[in-house]
Image (cartoon, coloured by chain):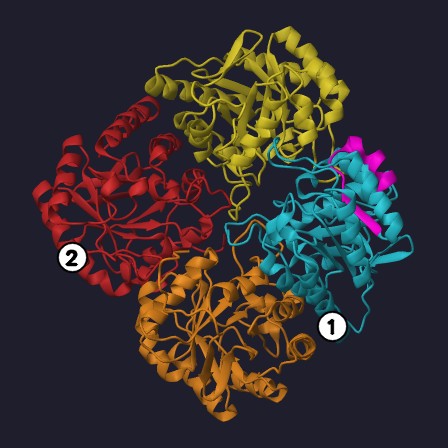
Chain colours: A orange, B cyan, C red, D yellow
Amino acid sequence: MNKNFIWKMQKGKPLEIKIKDMPIGREHFTFIAGPCTIENYDDLLEIAIHLKRMGIKFLRGGAYKMRTSPYDFQGLKEQGLNFIKEVSEKTEMITVSEVICAEDVDLMAEYIDILQVGTRNMYNYSLLKKLGKKTNPIILKRSMSSKIEEWLLAAEYIIAEGNPNVILCERGIRTFEDYTRYTLDISAIQAVKNLSNLPIIIDPSHSSGRRDMIESLSLAAVAAGANGLLIETHFAPDSTICDSQQTIDFEMLKNILVRTNKIRESIFQGETDE
Amino acid sequence: MNKNFIWKMQKGKPLEIKIKDMPIGREHFTFIAGPCTIENYDDLLEIAIHLKRMGIKFLRGGAYKMRTSPYDFQGLKEQGLNFIKEVSEKTEMITVSEVICAEDVDLMAEYIDILQVGTRNMYNYSLLKKLGKKTNPIILKRSMSSKIEEWLLAAEYIIAEGNPNVILCERGIRTFEDYTRYTLDISAIQAVKNLSNLPIIIDPSHSSGRRDMIESLSLAAVAAGANGLLIETHFAPDSTICDSQQTIDFEMLKNILVRTNKIRESIFQGETDE
Amino acid sequence: MNKNFIWKMQKGKPLEIKIKDMPIGREHFTFIAGPCTIENYDDLLEIAIHLKRMGIKFLRGGAYKMRTSPYDFQGLKEQGLNFIKEVSEKTEMITVSEVICAEDVDLMAEYIDILQVGTRNMYNYSLLKKLGKKTNPIILKRSMSSKIEEWLLAAEYIIAEGNPNVILCERGIRTFEDYTRYTLDISAIQAVKNLSNLPIIIDPSHSSGRRDMIESLSLAAVAAGANGLLIETHFAPDSTICDSQQTIDFEMLKNILVRTNKIRESIFQGETDE
Amino acid sequence: MNKNFIWKMQKGKPLEIKIKDMPIGREHFTFIAGPCTIENYDDLLEIAIHLKRMGIKFLRGGAYKMRTSPYDFQGLKEQGLNFIKEVSEKTEMITVSEVICAEDVDLMAEYIDILQVGTRNMYNYSLLKKLGKKTNPIILKRSMSSKIEEWLLAAEYIIAEGNPNVILCERGIRTFEDYTRYTLDISAIQAVKNLSNLPIIIDPSHSSGRRDMIESLSLAAVAAGANGLLIETHFAPDSTICDSQQTIDFEMLKNILVRTNKIRESIFQGETDE
């Protein structure tokens, strides 16, 4: 890490980010759930209502998808944005969706509250710079091949352009282990706290790629000090277009929510602001 | 994983191991602490008394050390075994120490309660087979380059010879990330539970190589469902012969112990049997 | 690999790509050299004249740079494009330069013969799609975290849009080894030949990050069957703005060129078309 | 690397090792071939005679096998040693076989000319120390998780005990790429030359785990400057007990031998001493 440099990213007091009066970071815990992909309006609404009832206030859903193969489903695109915007207005939920290229930033910043940068775009500096000109909070996923220093420097690309509202998201790195799809680097939580003032959330869904691991990894994340979770959830996980093997149902999510709160109460005496 | 094979390692009901009437595994939580290396009798005794007062019942300490360089300190050897045996008799603590080669198994099995196999010896099948002829519980550390399947097969080498008392210990794998010394694979906890009935404990000291991470990783481990922790502790961490940068003092250990218990009470309603 | 899919990328007869009557791929060997970054007109011209005299016909030079830190030098940009275009007209060399975002594709396709996609952009699908609408050959570097299958699917993003002229470039993957900056995956050469008809070239400069390894890796590449080399070269390597520790001088390049030709003659009885 | 230390391993003039008047290292090239496992006397003799006719002077064959599962075939053991000793006397070939534990060193040192330490035993320091008391040359395979520095320190364990005759063997490291079984680290050849005076040979069979890659990797190795090759060979590769998917037949071996010699003649003007 270049020690001579004055980063715009501050150390010291942890950052608190506000979106529609909801705080993220510092002592708050942000629970984000929803489907991998927005498939249609009715299903998204049903999922949102379920989540809302559990007390969850952040809804995720993909409209534009980055797929390894050019022949895989690439998302509902602008129609998907319309669906999630309508649903969020009905349910008063805060929305999270991935922006996959610089050209889409202006459009998406209108529709979506929190813009997410995926693991394959962490090094897409022209995208990061454009997001630095917006005021939306940005969830910056770690590249699967990124050292922690490079990840913070990617955040710095956004911050240096004027947008300080960066939320880091650890989603697993590439290793030789293949029982899980990626290896969740749980140490990244403390590392980020040592090196920056940014909030860090954990995505147990993509890191493991396995439904039977979401609970264990979620509880580990909250105990390790994460500021939130990003979990793929659907009322019928087995029937989803993508990521069905890692998507969980509402019952499992409820269980995680309850136990997450218990851990936070027991060790942090804090409150969860889902 | 070879699905056609009848493993001696059972799935289903988690294994409970007994050593001097203390249970390990299943709903029990095993807290093991002590210095990296036994340096002299007085220091070891002082550490043991401190740990005992905190309620910790398992004392670790290395007598034979595996060192990357042939010119580094290799441990007090038999003298170290004498020291830890005496200390354990005085304090009534259960001892854990590493056995580094097959030739030492008979001797060490007399002096030490629980024998530990280090990461560099996980593939040392002649050592594993010899341990399979003993009744001492064995802590089998994962090789830094081992897939979970290979680790379970290494356990099977011990079990197949007649000793079912294997405790797995995740201690970090080799990846490209260099902020930590190794990458703690927190997913291994759930993976081992999916695939076997063996207890699994976590070593946050060697996986991170950083004192400022031990607490975060320990709490993550307990929340993820680990059956115990193995933590390098010393009254004066900065003055130890080896591993000083990852060894913690009693105050930090106390803090971890308290918070570990709180997490376990909150989510498992279980009790910690240190 | 999805076996049910009809890829546009053909297997069987290796592809031959033509640029200004120079063939790339199949039995031809393409030697590309030049500075990491275009620093000024005069230096670039001097380098080009030197390379030309050695018989090298492909000149590389960066105008837009992707840098891990937002505060590092980001290249001469459009001025750099002007310099390399002028130099190529004077020396009749074919130019190679990196395009770092979709917005720059139209401009760069006018100035530069062969457009290069860097390791951090291999997953930048909007960039790849835009390159698929051009006729310039594309050098597609492998992501440092990409499996071979994902790399071929990234190539397919370009090919599926109509541009079949993709040249793959292996430049090292991320591993735990830190003596070199990345680990050159020499097996990728044969793997790509097994799975596709695309040419594959090797970048020994970025993979090792060490001047004292360029020759050994270059000779390995040609013997393993690579279709070319991409080597950072400068008349005064120690004084370059970036990558000086891996940039070689003309004497070392000459030596590599001579030995490369000897190997090709001895085992392939082919000719090198630099 | 500890710079303050006076290693017994010398830098500077490359080491030449002699075994039965055959030199290894320096400008010599050592071609070692034979089956993964010794299966019976007749097959081994047939293989040896074939190899001898091609001019190959080093015969490999496993008598004791390290297997990931305790239930896999573990070798013919002492019977295997008898077979290979008899065959070597008939054919006047120099033998190479793996020693899997310290207890077997004395016995094997009588039967076998060159003792091999496998990747899983590189950190088995009690084995290394025992080999340091013998005069047989030792082939020390790199651990799949070892940095180059640790590998050299493992060699130093042997050398420090009095046996300077260590031959390093790169056989692939663990990475995320799964098209090949391991990733051959071709850069290790130059790295070892930079850091030590020891010969280094390459094992393309275990590193790739694929028959269709042996030739490409072998040619790369010789061009990169390796001092030899260790290749699994059998007259009927598909019928072998282990490693059949990576074992090649004599025709493929002949082809590699011819092209290997051509490369060496063209660039080193040296001679191959198989």
Q: Secondary structure at mark 1?
A: helix
Relative horizontal placement of residue D68, taking residue C48 as reference (left or right):
right
Which of the pair C207/B100 is nearer the observer? B100
Q: Is residue D264 above or below residue B111?
A: above
Provide the chain ID for the residue under circle 1: B
| 1 vs 2, front mark | 1
Relative horizontal placement of residue C257, taking residue A93 as reference (left or right):
left
Q: Is residue A79 above or below residue C221?
A: below
Q: Residue furthest left?
A: C90
Picture quadrant of residue D136: top right
Q: Which mark is drawn over residue C110?
A: 2
Residue at the spot 63% in from the left edge and 66% down from the top edge: A217
Q: Residue furthest front?
A: B42
Provide the chain ID for the residue under circle 2: C
Which of the pair D63/D1 is nearer the observer? D1
Residue at the spot 60% in from the left edge and 23% down from the top edge: D160
Picture quadrant of residue D224: top left
What amino acid is at disc 2?
Glu
- In reply to whether residue C23 is colored magenta, the answer given is no
Q: Which residue is mark 1?
A: B262
Picture quadrant of residue D46: top right
The span shown in magenta is B94-113
User: Label 1 neighbourhood size at 10 Å, few (<14), some (14-19), many (20+)?
Assistant: many
User: Label 2 neighbourhood size at 10 Å, few (<14), some (14-19), many (20+)?
Assistant: few
Which of the pair D125/A70 is nearer the observer? D125
